[in-house]
Image (cartoon, rainbow, N blue to C red):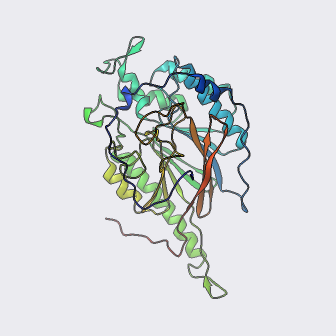
């Protein structure tokens, strides 16, 4: 089947909620050894008639741990696959759950990145990057929080590692806004946060401001084109440039697998912000749901995209797929559209057909009033 299917509304079938911190990592096996032993080079992404504004790799849930050699090997395999596709890609985005929150995991991640060629890295925090809260001595006890760790220390560890001033930030890549968001608190701050992303008012206001700035630029561009230029008696459409929003946790009741958790504490406000901007694309991970066999693209007043998992993907029953499946996305951004391809790292090949996400053009672009 195709990598994604586009449908207006998606509701995942109900099944028991699994707390991610209690879910065991699938062990190494002959099948996983086959993944690591596959050295085939993926074919270069199919050339389009025009050049992309930007191209990037999207990896989520790599779960690199110092004492988990398979997590390390899978991550390196993913890096090598992406480098073989496009060595000069603009970015490689690690969209949360990079580690299990321990300093030794970050040191391992640094070593892997230093020793493997890759595009410039950008990253967000996931819930597992707060898991220093569960570490006691040389191991983890998921029944009690550590008094020696905190949300603020987890954020400081992440921002220091990557050299960021805050856990959320933005950059322009080929004229495309890349907006990186992260949860800012964990259970030590408020037990009700659970595994969801807590987004401060400051971060949500920042997001809204960035999206509004992009709208203003698009509106100016449309006006410069005349907004009603006619060529042979027809309106000339001006393709919109998307704004890409990266957040580890997805919004509930969008992608398959998102009905099991709230995902984002402030999900109602985040949704209301994104719904005002039809050019917004929310890219997430967290659920681990298979990007090939489940619906991981949703279209509403904005677009949502899920990216499976590098460490291990889940099936539609919310269970780890066996033999282990490792996957990620390669995305090209064009005026008016995105082309999304899923990579099967086990076989070193594309999974399914590319998904093409068409965005509104200037004739469809409206500016809804603020509420």
> Looking at the figure, which quarter contains the C terminus?
bottom left
Q: What residue is at 51 percent from the left and 60 percent from the top?
A: 214
Q: Position of residue 342 (x, y in %)?
A: 59, 46
The one of 270 and 298 positioned closer to us in this rendering: 298
Q: Position of residue 349 (x, y in %)?
A: 67, 41
Q: What residue is at 36 percent from the left and 55 percent from the top?
A: 271
Q: Examine the rendered structure and indicate whether residue 357 appears above or below residue 190.
A: below
The quarter of the picture where residue 150 lies is top left
Q: Examine the rendered structure and indicate whether residue 323 appears above or below residue 212.
A: above
Q: Position of residue 360 (x, y in %)?
A: 52, 68
Q: What residue is at 57 percent from the left and 41 percent from the top?
A: 328
Residue 152 visible in the shown view: no
Residue 315 visible in the shown view: yes
Q: Residue furthest top?
A: 137
The quarter of the picture where residue 133 lies is top left
Q: Position of residue 159 (x, y in %)?
A: 49, 32
Label total for image: 0
Q: What residue is at 40 percent from the left and 55 percent from the top?
A: 10
Q: Examine the rendered structure and indicate whether residue 118 appears above or below residue 101.
A: below
The one of 48 and 282 positioned closer to us in this rendering: 48
The one of 201 and 368 positioned closer to us in this rendering: 368
The one of 42 and 246 positioned closer to us in this rendering: 42
Q: In the picture provided, is 93 more to the left or to the right than 183? A: right
């Amino acid at each position: 089947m195709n990598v994604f299917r586009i449908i207006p509304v998606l509701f995942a079938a109900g099944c028991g909620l699994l707390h991610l911190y209690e879910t065991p990592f699938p062990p190494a096996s002959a099948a996983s050894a086959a993944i690591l032993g596959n050295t085939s080079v993926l074919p270069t992404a199919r050339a389009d008639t025009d050049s992309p504004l930007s191209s990037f790799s999207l990896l989520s849930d790599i779960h690199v741990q110092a004492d988990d050699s398979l997590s390390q090997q899978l991550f390196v395999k993913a890096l090598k696959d992406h480098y073989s596709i496009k060595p000069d890609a603009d970015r490689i985005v690690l969209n949360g759950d990079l580690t299990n929150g321990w300093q030794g995991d970050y040191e391992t991640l640094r070593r892997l990145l230093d020793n493997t060629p890759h595009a410039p890295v950008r990253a967000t925090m996931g819930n597992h990057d707060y898991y220093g809260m569960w570490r006691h001595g040389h191991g983890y006890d998921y029944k009690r929080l550590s008094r020696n760790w905190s949300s603020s220390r987890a954020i400081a560890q992440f921002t220091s590692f990557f050299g960021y001033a805050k856990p959320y930030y933005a950059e322009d890549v080929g004229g495309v806004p890349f907006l990186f968001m992260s949860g800012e608190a964990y259970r030590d701050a408020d037990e009700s946060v659970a595994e969801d992303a807590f987004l401060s008012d400051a971060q949500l206001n920042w997001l809204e401001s960035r999206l509004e700035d992009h709208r203003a630029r698009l509106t100016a561009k449309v006006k410069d084109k005349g907004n009603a230029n006619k060529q042979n008696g027809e309106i000339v459409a001006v393709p919109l440039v998307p704004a890409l929003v990266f957040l580890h946790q997805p919004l509930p009741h969008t992608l398959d697998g998102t009905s099991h958790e709230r995902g984002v504490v402030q999900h109602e406000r985040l949704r209301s912000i994104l719904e005002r901007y039809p050019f917004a694309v929310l890219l997430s991970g967290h659920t681990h749901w298979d990007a090939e066999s489940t619906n991981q693209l949703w279209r509403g007043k904005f677009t949502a995209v899920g990216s499976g998992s590098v460490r291990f993907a889940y099936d539609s029953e919310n269970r780890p797929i066996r033999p282990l499946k490792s996957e990620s996305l390669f995305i090209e951004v064009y005026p008016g559209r995105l082309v999304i391809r899923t990579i099967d790292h086990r076989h070193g090949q594309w999974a399914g057909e590319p998904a093409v996400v068409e965005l509104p053009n200037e004739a469809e672009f409206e500016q809804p009033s603020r509420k």
